[in-house]
Amino acid sequence: MNENAFLSVLQTWPEYYTDPDEGLGTTYERFILHRYFRLIQSRFAIESVLEAPSFGMTGISGINSLWWSKNNITPVVLDDNPERIRQTEQVWKSIPLAVDLQRQDDWEQLPFEDQTFDLSWNFASLWFVAQPEKFARELQRITRKVIFICVPNIYGIGYRLRKRFNEIPRGMYAENIHPKRIKTLFTATGWSLWKSGYFDIPPWPDIAMKKEELFSKIGLGFLVNKKKDAVATARTCVVDYFNGTRPQLESEILKYAFLEGMPFPLKQVWAHHRYFIFTKTKIFQS
């Protein structure tokens, strides 16, 4: 059995740079992320952003912070792979939007002064951090206002099935994404959990690969090959939204967002991800 079947992007990430068709699922989760960026920005007046680590789920790596750059904040984005950094830089330049891409091999000691960033965040990358306690302390040290952590939903049907039928690859620490552990890691002195919940709840299951590829494998490719479905047949990539090629892409993608408001516990078993927003002082809790 291929141990990387648990998370296909471990093998496939280079392909997205040569063929930037991220698929409907990845593009959808990026647009849903923007909703939370807007919430954080409106509530906390963010002026500086760090994304670390930046390698997480599917699609083109290192571009989850595009929204911040589009809104006039140049994010600092950290990765530990020099080739990914090189490729990611070309994607940002092609849009073009500003970013400060840096290589960081040690997630337990970040090269920034205390309280450098208003917001530090990451998406589905915490399970690549070998010593999460040290990493959490570093984020708390360098962050002034908000820490935003997004992780795969361990209670979701899709995640449970992937974990049951695939081995977790070496170098991944699935215990890091347990909600209780995250709350313990990031509620140190002076930090509190401001808001948490489930998000990224589209009609399709959490499969950690392109929805189109899954349907083809199980004989349902016709569902995503109808010419009348522009989202399914065209290249689907959030880069095309930011560079102006497909300005309507957000509205096309978010027509699938009708389940985001579903009630708990249905949300708990179907959501692909869970989020945690930690704030530094209790003044933000009001």
Image: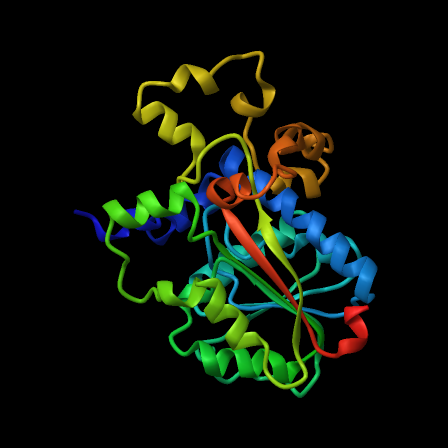
The residue at the point 50 percent across, 35 percent down is: 23
Residue 25 against residue 10 in the figure, above or below: above
Can you see residue 205?
yes
Horizontal and vertical percent position of residue 202: 55, 35
Residue furthest left in the image: 1
The residue at the point 26 percent across, 64 percent down is: 170
Can you see residue 81?
no
The one nearer the camera, 112 or 34, is 34
Q: Quadrant of residue 102?
A: bottom right
186 on left or right of 42:
left
The residue at the point 36 percent across, 30 percent down is: 214
Horizontal and vertical percent position of residue 79: 49, 67
Residue 127 against residue 192 in the figure, above or below: above
Residue 214 against residue 80 in the figure, above or below: above
85 on left or right of 41:
left
Horizontal and vertical percent position of residue 70: 75, 52
Q: Quadrant of residue 281?
A: bottom right
The one nearer the camera, 268 or 240, is 268
- Please state, as top left, top right, bottom left or bottom right, where the C terminus lies in the image: bottom right
Residue 109 against residue 195 in the figure, above or below: below
The residue at the point 35 percent across, 66 percent down is: 173
The one nearer the camera, 37 or 284, is 284
